Image (cartoon, rainbow, N blue to C red):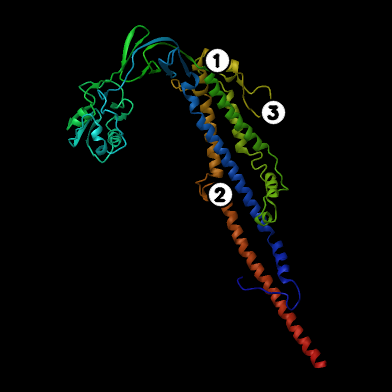
Amino acid sequence: MSDMRIGGLASGMDIDGIVKDLMRAEKQPLNKMEQDRTWTEWKRDSYREVNKQLLEFDNMMLDMKYTKTYEPKEVISSDESVLKATGNSSASNGVYSIEVTQVANAAYKVSSGAVSGTSIDPTQPLSNEKANFSNWENNGSFTITTHEGDETFTIDETGSLNDLLKEITDSGIGIRAFYNESSDQVMIERTNVGDFQGGDEISFSGNTGFLTNTLKLDTEQGGQGAEFIYNNAITIKSDDNNYSLNGVDYEFQKQGTATLNVSNNVDQSVKKITEFIDKYNSIVENLNNKVKEKRYRDFPPLTQEQRDGMEEKEIELWEEKAKSGLLRSDNIVRNTLSDMRFSWYQEVETGGTYTQLTQIGISTGINFQNGGQLEIDEVKLKEALQEDPQAVRELFAGNEASGGEGILQKLEDTIATTRDSIRRKAGNINSTDESYTLGRQIKDMNDRMDSFQERLSMIEDRYWAQFGEMERAIQQMNSQSAYLMQQFG
């Protein structure tokens, strides 16, 4: 009620305190509802945490399907100052001789001599510096053409030489321009290497006097592509300093000869598989902890009123026990653990050397208390990857040609089923309460709490009305008593 309530004036009783005590007792069912709702919300969030972990694991499986995971290539160059190289899974193991006879470079024009007698200050306005040029000539504008396009520039004597050269560099026609004070020369060069045949690669037109006479950019050094001899047998040309051949990517550094050794990088493959198994073990450990976690029924969720009367550390310690056992013995999680464990033990038709995980050194080991976590015999795994990496891959990823499923597909099916079950029960962050089971329960709890809160308000009003009647009766009795005493006084 909005009206001020004052009680106890006639009776001398603490009516406000009495009503609060009575309402505290009346409110107990509402506190229980609040605790049940909090527990249900925690359970929903715990399910969603499981779904998040399973999604991360599912995404991690994508890399485990690629050939590069099981047959990564290591390419070692005998001289990286001449040639650097990397390989993909299609690269053939072996030793290859590469002689770089020519590296690619870009076409350029550079001043044929010093453009001034003493060197100029390229940051000063051209109007201040033009007398310092050995042959100043300004005919207004000029055009530069490259294979990327052409651009016209106007000489502004209030701007500096650096301003003009920056405008040329930023023009988007694939060139950069700069002035070198120590040599007193200007250079314009293409940003792309290679020989773009068909005349000059950087050509001038229009009023070219400033470029050819003042800056002395009258001669071009053409660009060229790279060239190398493969295995002392064939000569191959490349437009730039990169070339791909038989699964190996070359990066030419300078002229010279280098030997490339291409081999399987077994250590890298073992690392990838180990990371995948470690992620699986982490999930198994987490899920096992959830279904085995003890529930402390003497530590229900705290109501807001209880939290207000406690220290932060007390709340933290209480909720640590209150949140324990949210998914204890949960059927969805237990079935997931069982199905995932079963997936690892099934035989896979690979058409190769290995058809079961134990053959490549992956098993549950001798510790039966670890809840199905896997152990890796690294020596055995390395041997398997060296002997038949394709069979190891098919053991995990299946055989696309035959349509045979590998371990990953079986795990994916289990995870998909689990995540769908969890979504139906606990939804996700974008779900409405009506779309999943726990959400509907929470909504129903909220509705019942709202109704009960209205009922409490009515009960409180009734208590105050009853005590109000008592006060008025006492006050009337007191008035009558005072009147009688006055009459007989």
Residue 481 picture location, percent across and down:
78, 86
Disc marking residue 439: 2
Instruction: Label 3, secondary structure: give it.
Output: loop
The span from disc 3 to disc 1 (Cα, nearest Å) is 28 Å
Looking at the rendered structure, the secondary structure element under dot 2 is helix
Residue visible at 58% across and 51% down? Answer: 442
Towards the viewer: 231 or 51? 231
Query: Disc 3 marks which residue?
Result: 369
Q: Position of residue 250 (x, y in %)?
A: 39, 17
- Camera-near label (2 vs 1) is 1
Is residue 311 left or right of 450 when viewed as pictured? right
Q: Is residue 488 above or below residue 255?
A: below
Quadrant (top left, top right, bottom left, bottom right) of the C terminus: bottom right
Query: In x, y percent, where is residue 423?
Result: 53, 42
The answer to whether mark 3 and mark 1 are in CB contact below 8 A is: no
Which residue occupies the foreground of this view, 15 or 185? 185
351 shown above or below 14 = above
The Cα–Cα distance between marks 3 and 2, rounded to whole angstroms, is 36 Å
Ranked by sequence position, the earlier of labels 3 and 2 is: 3
Task: Tell me the SS state at disc 1.
Answer: helix
**Viewer can see residue 348:** no
Label 3 neighbour load within 10 Å: few <14, some 14-19, many 20+: few
Give the number of the disc on residue 384: 1
Tag 1 or tag 3, which sits nearer the N-term?
A: 3
Mark 1 Cα shell of 10 Å, populated few (<14), some (14-19), many (≥20): many
Amino acid type assigned to the residue bearing label 2 in the image: Gly
